[in-house]
Image (cartoon, rainbow, N blue to C red):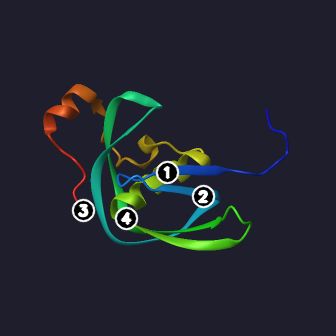
């Protein structure tokens, strides 16, 4: 049910334990090399899919103090932030997969021994 309030929040925890809070975030630019890594999601907890992602994204957002700013994220953190911001805009990682590429069972993914390397 919509209540007529246009607000969104993404909370991202980095592998280093940093918490990133983005209010009303929008990706305004993608740059740099694009790579493809497996991603998972609680929306599809039993599969993983290869998703292309730019190494650099620029995100316009509001801070907890109410200021609007642009923050630049790189590599793995860019991928994490993009994934969460996409959710706020109604996209899932499967929407970003290349045509003809399908998710694989998590058991098969574990067998690849593939982790994000940046």
In the depicted structure, whether residue 20 falls above or below residue 60? above
Q: Which residue is mark 1?
A: 12
Residue 82's x, y, as percent?
Answer: 47, 56
**Residues at marks 1 and 2 touching, judged by CB atoms closer than 8 Å:** yes
Disc 2 secondary structure class: strand
Residue 115's x, y, as percent?
Answer: 22, 47
Query: Which numbered disc, 1 or 4, marks the residue that appears first in the sequence?
Result: 1
Query: Which numbered disc, 1 or 3, marks the residue that appears first in the sequence?
Result: 1
Disc 4 secondary structure class: strand
In the depicted structure, whether residue 85 falls above or below residue 94? below
Query: Which numbered disc, 1 or 2, marks the residue that appears first in the sequence?
Result: 1
Q: CA distance from mark 1 to mark 3?
A: 18 Å
Residue 70's x, y, as percent?
Answer: 58, 73
Q: How many marks?
A: 4
In the depicted structure, whether residue 10 falls above or below residue 104? below
Q: Is residue 104 left or right of residue 1?
A: left
The residue lying at 68 percent from left, 50 percent from top is 8
The residue lying at 49 percent from left, 42 percent from top is 92
Q: Which mark is residue 22?
A: 2
Disc 1 secondary structure class: strand
- Kindly indicate the quadrant of the structure image that contains residue 23: bottom right
**Image quadrant occupied by the N terminus:** top right
Q: Which mark is residue 118?
A: 3
Q: CA distance from mark 4 to mark 2?
A: 19 Å
Foreground: disc 1 or disc 4: 1
The residue lying at 48 percent from left, 31 percent from top is 43
Query: Which numbered disc, 4 or 2, marks the residue that appears first in the sequence?
Result: 2
How packed mark 4 is, by other alpha carbons closer than 10 Å (few <14, some 14-19, many 20 or more), is some
């Amino acid at each position: 049910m919509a209540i007529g309030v246009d607000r969104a929040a993404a909370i991202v925890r980095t592998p280093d334990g940093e918490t990133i809070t983005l209010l009303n975030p929008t990706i305004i630019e993608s740059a740099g090399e694009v790579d493809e890594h497996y991603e998972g999601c609680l929306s599809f907890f039993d599969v993983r899919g290869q998703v292309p992602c730019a190494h650099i994204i620029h995100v316009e957002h509001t801070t907890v103090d109410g200021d609007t700013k642009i923050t630049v994220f790189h590599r793995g953190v860019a991928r994490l932030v993009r994934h969460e911001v996409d959710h706020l805009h109604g996209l899932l990682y499967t929407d970003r997969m290349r045509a003809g590429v399908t998710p694989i069972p998590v058991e098969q993914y574990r067998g690849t021994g593939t982790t994000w390397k940046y």
